[in-house]
Amino acid sequence: QVQLVESGGGLAQAGGSLRLSCAASGRAFSRHSVGWFRQAPGKEHEFVAAISWIGGRIYGLDSMEGRLFISRDNAKNTVTLRMNNLKPEDTAVYYCAASESEGIRTIAAGYDYWGQGTQVTVSS
């Protein structure tokens, strides 16, 4: 089992930045790929970004193109999602998830472990 805890969400102004962190505990985390998803009220989960255990990255939202950076520190069992130039439409609950697969997954069904989520609210 892997336990995931997100942090770093909160209220931000449009144009600002936030850094979300996902801390893992439990089984060895370093060989898991990790993804971030978000869910806005009344919407389905959206894939935001993912990183493989060796650092390969993929970003999923055209609306956030150029505004994201995902990174990981396997020694510290953390994955970080940096979001820049935030917009009100980025408001959502952001979840991190870990996959037993070493390869990157871009759909929610590809992930085995989920955190509780962290709320991001962007004001205009």
Image (spheres, rainbow, N blue to C red):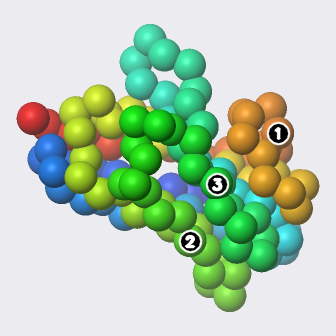
Q: Amino acid at mark 3?
A: Ile
In 3D space, how far apart are the residues under numbered discs 1 and 2 (Cα atoms)? 19 Å
What numbered label is drawn on residue 58? 3
In front of the other: label 3 or label 1?
Answer: 3
- Check the image and report above or below for 11 versus 38: below
Q: Amino acid at mark 2?
A: Ser
**Mark 1, residues whose alpha carbon is within 10 Å: few (<14), some, or many (≥20)?**
some
Q: Quadrant of residue 40?
A: top left
Looking at the rendered image, the quarter that the N terminus falls into is bottom right
Residue beneath the point at 29% across and 30% down: 89
Q: Earlier in the sequence, mark 3 or mark 1?
A: 3
Q: Amino acid at mark 1?
A: Gly
Q: Is residue 113 visible?
A: yes
Residue under numbered circle 1:
110
Residue under numbered circle 2:
71
- Check the image and report above or below for 14 versus 2: above
